[in-house]
Image: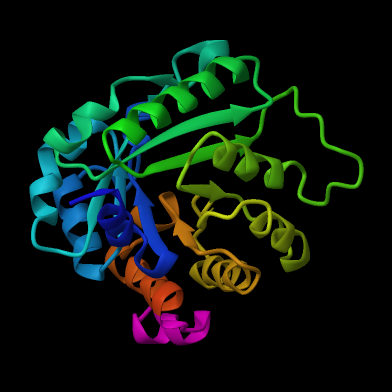
Amino acid sequence: MDKAQRLATLLPNGRGVWIPIDHGASDYPNPGLEDLEGLIQSLIDAGVNAIVAQKGVVSTYAHLCQGTSTGMVVHYSVSTRHAGPESNNKVLVGHADETLPRGGIGVSSQVNMGSEREPEMIQRMGELNRQALHTDLPAFGMVYARGPNLNHQEGDKTKSQAHAVRLAFELGCDAAKCVWTGDEASFTEVAKSAPIPLLMAGGPSNDDTRSVLAMVESALNAGASGVCMGRQVFAHPNPGAMAKALVMMVHNGASAASAMEACNL
């Protein structure tokens, strides 16, 4: 399998439902991540395109994806809640050449734009993407505009979210995570900022399934290529049904209301 085939698995027709479950490395206990095998199997059964996880999780559970349409992406960035002022400094904990032996078919890394350690994180993402290039692996970027040094351009309705995905693209990412800006008009500016698939983040866990799926519907209308949602799925009372609803919306064009009804949410 070459890079193009791996991309086609993770992003069929340039669209994707990705579920990140790497949160346990940064903070644990974490509701919904206690039974990883059961969770991963439910996501595979729902037909998600990718599961993003730390390398130990991929090594342990990638076999579950064999013979399915779901691939695993290794997220190589990590920090923990115990690092004090360094808790947002995402360091790399591996090399792209580990990915295939562990069972992954893509790599992922994170930059917290505007943080005190932004330059180092940019360098790390660039380095991982260089490694991915030479190992024929797709690279995914999670760039968050969230640091204390953010300096929004005057008139930027996206509050630097467009810059975040542009940075991921310019550092060589094949796809990137993006953050909902609150309305379709401003999110359209984010969607137009980079010629790569952009997958919308879910944000903090939300008990209101209807509002989450309505947000997804708006983002898809405004140009998102899919979703990259963790807590909204794995912390949901029925992760499999929530994931299936997202698959229906992203790949089948279902509305939020019809997806909810079909999945009994």
Q: How is the image coloured?
A: rainbow
**Lateral position of residue 210 relative to residue 57, left or right:** right
**Which quarter of the picture shows residue 251?**
bottom left
Q: Residue at x 43, y 33 (%)?
A: 109
In the picture, the quarter occupied by the C terminus is: bottom left
Residue 173 lies, in percent from the top left, at 48, 41
Say if residue 235 shows up in the picture.
no
Residue 208 lies, in percent from the top left, at 53, 66
Q: Residue at x 43, y 22 (%)?
A: 127
**Lateral position of residue 133 relative to residue 226, left or right:** left
Say if residue 211 shows up in the picture.
yes
Q: Nearer the viewer, residue 32 or 41?
A: 41
Verify whether residue 264 appears in magenta: yes
Q: Nearer the viewer, residue 163 or 151?
A: 163
Magenta stretch bounds: 252-265
- Residue found at the very far right of the displayed protein: 154
Residue 83 lies, in percent from the top left, at 47, 12
Residue 101 lies, in percent from the top left, at 12, 34
Q: Nearer the viewer, residue 238 or 26?
A: 26
**Which quarter of the picture shows residue 146?**
top right
Q: Residue at x 50, y 57 (%)?
A: 197
